[in-house]
Amino acid sequence: MTTITMGKALNEALRDALRDDPRVLVYGEDVGRLGGVFRVTDGLRAEFGEERVFDTPLAESTIAAIAVGLAIKGFHPVAEMQFDAFSYPAFNQITSNLAKYHTRTQGACNMQAVIRIPYGGNIGAVEHHSESPETYYVHTAGLKVVTPSTPADAYGLLRAAIADPDPVIFLEPKARYWSRQDLDLPAPPLPLDRAQIVRPGTDGTIIAYGPTVQVALAAAEAAEAEGASLEVVDLRSLSPLDLDTLSASVRKTKRAVVVHEAPVFMGIGAEIAARLMHDLFDVLAAPVERVGSATVPYPPARVEKLFLPDADRVLEAVDRTRQY
Amino acid sequence: MTTITMGKALNEALRDALRDDPRVLVYGEDVGRLGGVFRVTDGLRAEFGEERVFDTPLAESTIAAIAVGLAIKGFHPVAEMQFDAFSYPAFNQITSNLAKYHTRTQGACNMQAVIRIPYGGNIGAVEHHSESPETYYVHTAGLKVVTPSTPADAYGLLRAAIADPDPVIFLEPKARYWSRQDLDLPAPPLPLDRAQIVRPGTDGTIIAYGPTVQVALAAAEAAEAEGASLEVVDLRSLSPLDLDTLSASVRKTKRAVVVHEAPVFMGIGAEIAARLMHDLFDVLAAPVERVGSATVPYPPARVEKLFLPDADRVLEAVDRTRQY
Amino acid sequence: MVDTLGARAAHDSHPADPIAAMVNADGLLTAEAERAANISDDVLRDLYRRMAICRRLDQEGLNLQRQGELGLWGPIAGHEAAQVGAAMAMAETDWIFPYYRDFAMTICRGVDPGIAMTWFRGLTHGAWNPYEHRLGPLIISVGTQVPHAVGFAIGCKLDHEPTAVLVGFGEGSTSTGDWHEAMNFAGVFKAPVVFLCENNQWAISVPMREQVAGRVADRAAGYGFPGLRIDGSDVLTVYTVVRAAADRARHGEGPYLVEALTYRFQAHTTSDDPTRYRTDADVEPWRAKDSIARATARLRDRGAFSDDFERAVAAEAEETALAMRATLLSAATPHPGQAFDLVFANPPASLLREQAEFVAELEPGSAE
Amino acid sequence: MVDTLGARAAHDSHPADPIAAMVNADGLLTAEAERAANISDDVLRDLYRRMAICRRLDQEGLNLQRQGELGLWGPIAGHEAAQVGAAMAMAETDWIFPYYRDFAMTICRGVDPGIAMTWFRGLTHGAWNPYEHRLGPLIISVGTQVPHAVGFAIGCKLDHEPTAVLVGFGEGSTSTGDWHEAMNFAGVFKAPVVFLCENNQWAISVPMREQVAGRVADRAAGYGFPGLRIDGSDVLTVYTVVRAAADRARHGEGPYLVEALTYRFQAHTTSDDPTRYRTDADVEPWRAKDSIARATARLRDRGAFSDDFERAVAAEAEETALAMRATLLSAATPHPGQAFDLVFANPPASLLREQAEFVAELEPGSAE
Ligand SMILES: Cc1ncc(C[n+]2csc(CCOP(=O)(O)OP(=O)(O)O)c2C)c(N)n1
Ligand SMILES: Cc1ncc(C[n+]2csc(CCOP(=O)(O)OP(=O)(O)O)c2C)c(N)n1
Ligand SMILES: [Mg+2]
Ligand SMILES: [Mg+2]
């Protein structure tokens, strides 16, 4: 058991995948010599050589596109997009090809590829480095989309994503890269379509993922001090959504708050709230609340915290469901 | 009063805009000589010359990007993307620049630009020609997104979109290009943020837009024969949503069904259902139902109709709300 | 009107490129290069035969569309030499990544024409198994297949396989960002790719001069590898040049760009109306360069063309067209539930549940 | 190690390009061209002065970041000649579209350095009014500003204005699809754009040879306009060549690509650690080409450099740095509600309502 960061857990997952499966390739901008701007690929090029871990030109569309070609050739590419908004130049290749190639070849070609995307805010960065692009990928049929909230999940989900025969958008909550956990490695792979109850409770359910799980847990802890028992569910998988787990929790607690950094408008909270209120219409004691960012472009670093969900805003939302 | 098609109404709106405002430019692939693959720009090059109506190379990203440059220079560009899925190569320019340039220049540069996108299915086309990309644009703060369902609305919304100082994604329901209406032109411009009740009713509200308004009206007509009075709301604006009009309707009818061609999962129905059930939690007699496509890539032409909403599927959803 | 390749042939800037030396200023194989290439009469006859059959199938595509049996047809007339010449120049173990118009490449790769046509009938998004024919699916999103080919070629290199990859695209496709990114990647990784630009002068209604600044072939130099403009209506030139470029790639010498000048004689697709943007007079000069007539002339020069041969090919073409029609019309409509089966290799339970509900709703009787 | 432009200078393929004739095989202004250009001592002194001030401000950026006053700083050391030379070569009525590293262009365009720095402090996404300075905002999404410049330039042409547009970008940016699409559009529309590639050998950790297949300057030929690789550390060369290219553009002769070879002496940004990918020995040869030393030498040759002048410039630089710091540190944090004000010129009522709620929640007292 050692204490490791999420960044290191991801690094170990890549290392173990490269070691266990000779078809795995890791590439992207600055992933080689530099080890990635967040050091997630640190040391991999030295260990596995330039043929398996390599830098590419600055061209996200083709970074995604060669994943298609390499997957057809039987490789298992793991490509990195340097930051969330820099995955947008690859949008057409991801949406029109990576997501549809299996369908287009009548199942003959597996797109066993992972696109890693550090995402989310709260790191004091300049424009384009703090976005939450999950809606764009989640609405695209043919992609699986997952995101971890802890080092153990990061390891387990990334191993499973690389081993899965389908294309996985792997969203890494960059503000959590330095979060730590005691961990035995290799940790077990995790299913790609299951949510996890990370804190049991009875009076309400907070649904979160990636960077907001910690916020939800802090809110639940604060609520406990005031005598309220809140359950926290970590989605882990954003597409598909594990509605069985969500429904079971909310059926029990009768209240739900969804928390994400993305704008509320058309964020994943919309789908979750719509489904929960639809399926549990007679069970819910109050409407599902959503906490997220405003309908504005991601604001400058000095004011970003005001737009991001924090424990206070989550607790206010919980209160709205409890005082309904 | 003449009977004109939606395609012609759009053509007239472009013509009148070009005539009334010397800063308006119309460009895209095949919009010049050919008049567009749907003939929406027919005759405009001959009338206004190659400097104001021009063909571009096949490069959607730069088609969107020069709209940014031209808008800074004080032009009012109206760019065409040839089909829905061919707007995806422009995704980064639309999302990272067109939507954010006003913010980025502290309000100094207006992005008075319109991106016209024919969208939706039901035309028996090959891959990429039948998609409903609205979620991608609606979730992007900084864009206004509208879509007409009739020739009159097509004219009125397009004139308003061109005159508006902000970037507008103008979605044209391509299967409705040949729909006809008696119309006096020029018709009045329409507000870009208002829904319209297109059929009043008391027993339930069908919320539709673009290609599905006709489907909703057919369903309402069929329901009337069976003694049910359904209200039909045409969203017209997808971002922002006119929640006042939606709420007022549903407050009255107590039931709502949202209908779109896009997959249900993370379609606009999610946001509308979440908002309506949140705001009218105690008013609704049944959960909000959603009718849309499945969570699959758009299917081949010979089976597409099975995936698209039709009056039957809408009525079944209405029945679910009435028999709840 | 017809661009005769002009004086500034791309090979001028690559004096060291032996492939460029194979063609003259008109982009045609020189007599010397023809001798050196030593292409047998049988091979040339086979190229002729394939072009003639494809032309007949193309005509049948138009017929089928007019008769309402196809949703769409994208005519290839004018592209036969480029497509047949290039496809047949590749070794069987090589791969081809086609664009939507590369029907003749598809046929050359052994796909049953009637099955290939199901794509245009709206029955499927992909009519063959790429591994069976070493042939990617038809790609519609313009230019996006170019970096797929480069990615695949990088994979071949990583596997130390002597495989070359051919990728087809129109001159309009060279305007896309993906095309450029792929060219640069190919140069950086020295990937074994032959880029084949089927420059047919038009991208729907947009003429080449409004589409391509400069010349396509000249662009290769900026990526550090050679490019060559050739006469794309002469099948022997296309075959010989592409074969040499593929050999070169297989020998680790990196990518090569071939710009095959040709013309689209018919509409862009059956949805198009070319009278809106060009006249018969525009088309006429190109008809004189017709690929089948020129292959005939080449065979006659060699004394390898006979009336019997011509008749036999025509009969085979007719038979193939009939068989294609029969196969197409008997192809089953896919079960709608199939759309769900094809999304993932490892579908999540939620999608299988959605599929079951979908199928049950369509066929109320079948629901449990 | 240092690429000395080699034998295959881009102008070889454009013998008719008079601008190419201005530089020698090392990309340096020839003595003859210098005489012809007739750049006065005062202008050269002003270029020196601006470079020296910008170098001092760059150092202050590093200091401020280390002191926690900036979220990020992107050093420009090594780029002074390219940025100052190019910016000052443009007429006042011309426009400039910079990339994130073009701080010296910003200063040359009259933006208050302390205001410019608010961007790096995280106070704003855009620190100046583009119309006031004829200067676009800093663009981070690599390559995306290049087609903006082309669009703007097409607009200038449509307005029949004799305006030239300069756009800056790194060599890494040339790998993006947008860069290519913009080059092609510029060629097709003969847009009055000067493309300035600040080729500093690195895109973060990726060296030029793994980034750019072929040579950037050579790519222009494929778009039908000239490209020229020059010594980007010699401000007089940059100034003279860019001025000529802008003149040419203003006279309707179309785009021009200048590849200014230079080096990034510092880290990519303050978040970067260059020791992971390069050594001091890699950097050393480029230090010998330092732009300020070379401008000093040029001025000395002309007898136009004195100790007094040097001291005066140093004093002005020091003063400017202090003023910059003061302005920066006193800049107000924007009201958070401002984020809503800046989204649209014509905001919908729903957004104003959201803003009111947002502000009320932040400041419970202020709610009505
Ligand atoms: C990204 C994208 N944009 C637009 C289209 C619509 N479109 C289909 S073919 C075509 C012209 C392509 O021309 P070219 O590449 O020269 O090939 P050709 O059809 O002439 O063989 C266009 C604009 C598309 N399929 N994909
Ligand atoms: C589309 C995009 N992808 C990735 C990045 C991250 N990034 C910022 S700068 C940079 C390198 C750019 O190199 P170059 O264009 O040579 O400019 P330089 O920084 O050397 O001046 C990268 C990869 C980005 N900003 N935008
Ligand atoms: Mg073409
Ligand atoms: Mg660089």
Image: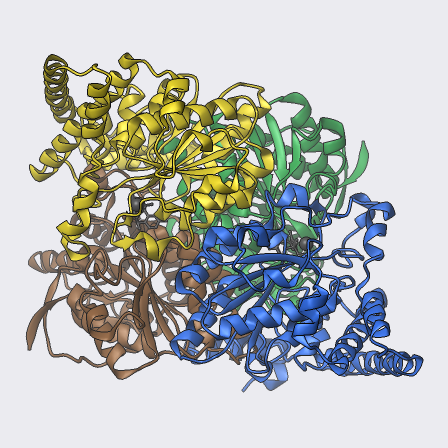
Chain colours: A green, B brown, C yellow, D blue
Identify the residue at image location x=11%, y=20%: C314
Horizontal side of D36 relative to A164 (left or right) equals right
Res. C237 image quadrant: top left
Q: Quadrant of the N terminus of chain D?
A: top right
| Horizontal and vertical percent position of residue B210 | 25, 61
Residue A183 seen from this side:
yes
B305 vs C321, nearest the viewer = C321
Q: What percent of the width, then of the height, locates residue D258? A: 60, 60
How many numbered discs, if any? Answer: 0
Q: Is residue D348 left or right of residue A313?
A: left
In the displayed structure, C268 sits above or below B303; it is: below
Quarter of the C terminus of chain D within the rendering: bottom right
Query: Whole-percent x and y of residue C169?
Result: 36, 39
Q: Residue at x 41, y 23 (%)?
A: C243
Q: Is residue C86 visible?
A: no
Percent x, y for residue A30? Answer: 68, 44
- Tell me if A213 is positioned left or right of C320 in this view: right
Q: Is residue B38 above or below residue A144?
A: below
Q: Residue at x 73, y 68 (%)?
A: D235
The answer to which image quadrant residue A157 occupies is top right
